[in-house]
Amino acid sequence: MPVTVAMVSQVPDMEAKGLVPDTIHASNTVMSVADKPVSSGLMEDKIYVAVGRDVESKSTLIWALQNTGGKEFCIFYLHEMLHFSTSMKLRDEHRNERQKAERFLDKYLNISRQMGVRAEKLYMETTSIEKGIVEVISQQRVRKLVMGAASDRNYSMRMRDVKSRKAIFVRQHAPPTCHIWFTCNGYLICTREAVMDNIYLEYASPHQSVERHVSRVQSTSSGQDSVSRQSGITTGSERAPSFPEGAKDEAGYDQIRVALAEAEKSKQEAVLEANRRQKAEKDAIDATTRAKRLEREYSEELKRRKEAEIEAGKAKAELGKIRSFFDNRIAESERRASKLQHQYNLAVRALQRFMKERDELQAELNKAEGLTRRNRAEPPQCFFCPILKEIMEDPQVAADGFTYEAEAIRQWLERGHDTSPMTNTRLPHTGLVPNLALRSAIQEWLQLRQTKEVISQT
């Protein structure tokens, strides 16, 4: 299918006269070029980048700008149309679609400008995107193309070949002289190498070199005008002119043979040099891609390591807090255990005193019972409170080991005293223990005295 390229600078006048629609139709594909004309002489040096509508997915363009080493780029977008028509409604739709495309293509150009790369934009309408790409490559003699191997969301580390239907079609049907890089999500997936077509782009054909040399020999030997002889040998497709009879000497033939040998050698050297350059370019691109990939992986690994160090620092700080908390709890527990041990020791000593006092009271009680049996009415001295000097009703043992009336010793402590009423020494604690044995002895003595008084009255 032929493709017609229209420059933007030429379209407004035609549209103003109502001669053409917004897009110029040619078979099934329509093109419009923006920013500057695309000359055929620059096509071979330009790198074409096929982009999508989603500017957020700009990985293909960024990879091309960073890795291909090109000086000029052409960013192009193909819009797939179901059919072309000159009706006013469809013309308006085409105009709106083109305006939208111009806006997001401008965003791609801004990305190029920010990266310091010169670029132009190209908008195309076609009934088949993959066929449109192949047609543009063929008609405009595109030598270098960067396009997506698949959508970025379908990328995986194991991806080694193109996945999308468009990329497969372009790889199979694009002219062999076009070098194509297929990328996905900012990574080079694969490359389709270009095939040199008779290496006419950089080197002249050997027939041209021989013909120029022969013309130079003929003009020298015959003295005729060399301009007329060279006019017919500027391209390899034209036949070389016949030699005059005067030039057919041994020296002339030797020079022709040398020229042919040199031309063949130059051709072989040119092919080898072109292959070396192509291989070196590929190796450089692959090395750059691997270096950038390793750099990204190193940056990601460094970032993960820093995050792990931060998390480890946080965990260490949290562990320190937990350890400090439990150390404080252990120290507090040890202090409480020491305090309880001290209180236990005091309680044991108090119990020992109480048992000793109980034994003494029991002995005194036995003695009192003996005296009672002898009709002695005086109570034992231990029945009296040291403070009140009266017989106790509720005897309580204090921390000093002495027994007091409960009410009397409580009043003593409530008035702020913390010393023993008997020894005037500091009390270890203010706890009181009921002296049950003494109370039983006092109650028994009182009942006995009451019984004795009743008996004496009768």
Image (tube, rainbow, N blue to C red):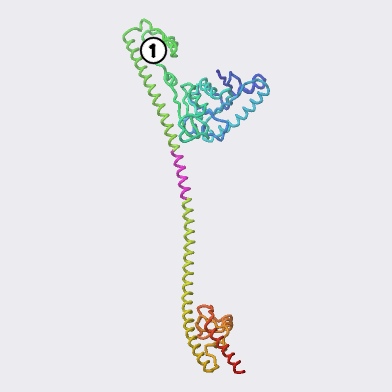
> Residue 360 vs residue 220: left or right?
right
Which is nearer the eye, 11 or 167?
Answer: 167
**Quadrant in which the N terminus is drawn:** top right
Which is nearer the eye, 375 or 1?
Answer: 375
**Quadrant in which the C terminus is drawn:** bottom right
Res 282 quadrant in image: top left
**295 within the magenta span:** yes
**132 within the magenta span:** no
Element type where label 1 sits in the image = helix
Q: Which residue is mark 1?
A: 216
Res 12 quadrant in image: top right
Residue 390 location (% of width, % of height): 57, 89
> Residue 219 vs residue 406: left or right?
left
Q: Residue furthest top?
A: 245
Residue 264 location (% of width, % of height): 36, 17
Residue 368 location (% of width, % of height): 51, 90
In the rendered image, the vertical position of residue 22 relative to residue 300, given as above or below = above
Which is nearer the eye, 214 or 354?
Answer: 354
Residue 295 location (% of width, % of height): 44, 39
Read off the magenta span.
Answer: 294-309
